[in-house]
Image: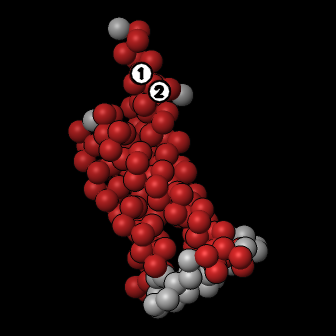
C-alpha cells in the first residue's frame, strides 16, 4: 500500500480536490445555492488544492505535502465548525452570519447528516489522510537510504 500511495497518492488527492471543487461549483452555479460565509472560507482553502496537487502530481513532487497539508487541515477545521453551527443551535449564536445566507441553513440534508459542510469535511479528511500517507512513505524511504 505504501508503494502505491507513494506513486499514486498525489493523483488520488488531486482527484478528491477536483471532485470537491466541481461539486461546490455545481451547487452554486447550476443549482443556484448561494454559499454562506463559512462555505466561502472552505472554497478558498479547497480551490488552490486543485492547482497545487495537480502540479505536484504531474511533477511527482511529494514534498508538496508541507504546503498542501495546512490548507486541508484548516479547511477541515472550518468544515467542523460549520457542521456544528448547522447541527447545534447554540453554535449558530456564537458567530452568526450577518450578511447573505445564514451559515446554519441546510440546502442539503440527506439521511439527516449529509450536508454540504459534511461533504467538504469528507474531502478535506481524505486529502489530509492521503497526504500524511505520502509523507510517511517518503520518510520511510529516506530512512531506508
**What residue do we see at 45% from left, 25% from top?**
137
Q: Nearer the viewer, residue 53 or 78?
A: 78
**Looking at the image, residue 47 lies above or below residue 15:** below
**What residue do we see at 42% from left, 69% from top?**
41
The local crowd at label 1, few if under 14, some if 14 to 19, many if 20 or more residues have their Cα within 10 Å, is few
**What residue do we see at 31% from left, 59% from top?**
48
Q: Nearer the viewer, residue 92 or 46?
A: 92
Q: Quadrant of residue 107?
A: bottom right
The local crowd at label 2, few if under 14, some if 14 to 19, many if 20 or more residues have their Cα within 10 Å, is some
The outermost residue toward the front is: 94
Q: Secondary structure at mark 2?
A: helix
Give the side of residue 2 with respect to residue 87, left or right.
left
Q: Quick check: marks 2 and 1 in contact, CB under 8 Å?
A: yes
The residue where tag 2 is placed is 136
The outermost residue toward the top is: 145
**What residue do we see at 49% from left, 33% from top?**
133
Q: Secondary structure at mark 1?
A: helix
Distance from disc 2 to disc 1, alpha carbons, whole Å, reads 5 Å
**Looking at the image, residue 40 lies above or below residue 118:** below
Residue 98, position in %: x, y?
49, 89
Residue 37's disc is: none
| Residue 120 visible to the viewer | yes
**Looking at the image, residue 34 lies above or below residue 50:** below
Residue 139's disc is: 1
Residue 127, position in %: x, y?
48, 49
Q: For the N terminus, which image quadrant? A: top right
Give the side of residue 109 with respect to residue 73, left or right.
right
Residue 36, position in %: x, y?
48, 82
| Residue 32 visible to the viewer | no
Q: For the C terminus, which image quadrant? A: top left
Residue 78, position in %: x, y?
52, 63
Q: Quadrant of residue 58?
A: top left
Amino acid at each position: 500500500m505504501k508503494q502505491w500511495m507513494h506513486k499514486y497518492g498525489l493523483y488520488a488527492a488531486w482527484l478528491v480536490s477536483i471532485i470537491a471543487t466541481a461539486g461546490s461549483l455545481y451547487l452554486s452555479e447550476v443549482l443556484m445555492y448561494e454559499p454562506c460565509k463559512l462555505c466561502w472560507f472552505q472554497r478558498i482553502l479547497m480551490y488552490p488544492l486543485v492547482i497545487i496537487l495537480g502540479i505536484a502530481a504531474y511533477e511527482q513532487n511529494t514534498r508538496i505535502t508541507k504546503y498542501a497539508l495546512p490548507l486541508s487541515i484548516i479547511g477541515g477545521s472550518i468544515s467542523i465548525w460549520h457542521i456544528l453551527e448547522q447541527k447545534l443551535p447554540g453554535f449558530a449564536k456564537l458567530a452568526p452570519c450577518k450578511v447573505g445566507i445564514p451559515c446554519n441553513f441546510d440546502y442539503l440534508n440527506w439521511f439527516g447528516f449529509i450536508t454540504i459542510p459534511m461533504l467538504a469535511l469528507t474531502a478535506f479528511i481524505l486529502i489530509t489522510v492521503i497526504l500524511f500517507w505520502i509523507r510517511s512513505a517518503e520518510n520511510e524511504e529516506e530512512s531506508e537510504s
